[in-house]
Amino acid sequence: MKQVLIETQFFTAKPLKLVEGTVPTSNPVVQGILATSEIKNGNGRYYSRELWEREIDKYMENVNANRALGELDHPDSSIINLKNVSHNIKKIWWDGDNVMGAIELLPTPSGNILRALFENKIPVGVSSRGMGSLKQMGDLMEVQDDFELLCWDFVSTPSNPGSYMQLVKEGKENLPENKFVKVNSLLTEILCANGTCPIF
């Protein structure tokens, strides 16, 4: 019987320059290990390389369509709730048996909490969420071929080794200023110059 399978791991960031190409966004980006195949994880589960490759190939449709969204904290649900969305995966690639990812932190309420955690150097984990069944194989539970990857969420305690992520900073110690704040301020000043504000 299929059930919601949640796998959590710490996400340790590497410099963004290691990602092929660029991630076109003005929002903060983190990157690191999303998942690892061919090992027993902290939940006692085993995912084959073939299974992850199949699911990553399918999930790339979401990445390419700019809708590889995830939530802050894990719901026990197969639905991604837009009101809780905190991030969007921009790139996925393989490094050995590790599934790597570059993740944009969105300026949503949950995304702002996530950003504050990273800015304050608080370790945060990334966790896969999917639907599937398990089969006992000795001392581990093998994830079966009916597994379907839903998304990756950010959580406090990961089960996959090495999946804590940290904020990627390029050059400056502080994050770049949000350009939209300046634009909004300038537009408000122009539109409200006559003493009335048609935008309010």
Image (cartoon, rainbow, N blue to C red):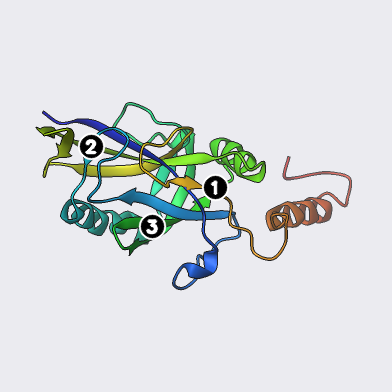
The answer to which of marks 2 and 1 sits earlier in the sequence is 2
Query: Quadrant where the C terminus lies?
Result: top right
Residue picked out by circle 1? 106
Residue picked out by circle 2? 45
SS category of the residue bearing label 3: strand
Residue picked out by circle 3? 100
Q: Residue at x 67, y 41 (%)?
A: 120
Front-lying residue, 190 or 96: 96
Place of residue 83 in the rendered image (x, y in percent of width and height, measured from the top left): 47, 33
Relative height, residue 145 to residue 2 (above, below):
below
Relative height, residue 21 to residue 178 (above, below):
below
SS category of the residue bearing label 2: strand
Q: Residues within 10 Å of mark 2 (few under 14, many from 20)?
A: many
Place of residue 98 in the rendered image (x, y in percent of width and height, measured from the top left): 33, 56
Q: Residue at x 17, y 32 (%)?
A: 139
* Amino acid on which disc 3 is placed: Met
The answer to which of marks 2 and 3 sits earlier in the sequence is 2
* Amino acid on which disc 1 is placed: Leu
3D distance between C-alphas at marks 2 and 3: 19 Å
Furthest residue toward front: 139
Are the residues flagged by discs 1 and 3 in contact, CB closer than 8 Å?
A: no
Q: Is residue 1 left or right of residue 23?
A: left
Q: Nearer the viewer, mark 2 or mark 1?
A: 2
Q: Quadrant of residue 4?
A: top left
Place of residue 129 in the rendered image (x, y in percent of width and height, measured from the top left): 31, 38
The answer to which of marks 1 and 3 sits earlier in the sequence is 3
Q: Is residue 46 left or right of residue 104?
A: left
Q: Residues within 10 Å of mark 3 (few under 14, many from 20)?
A: many
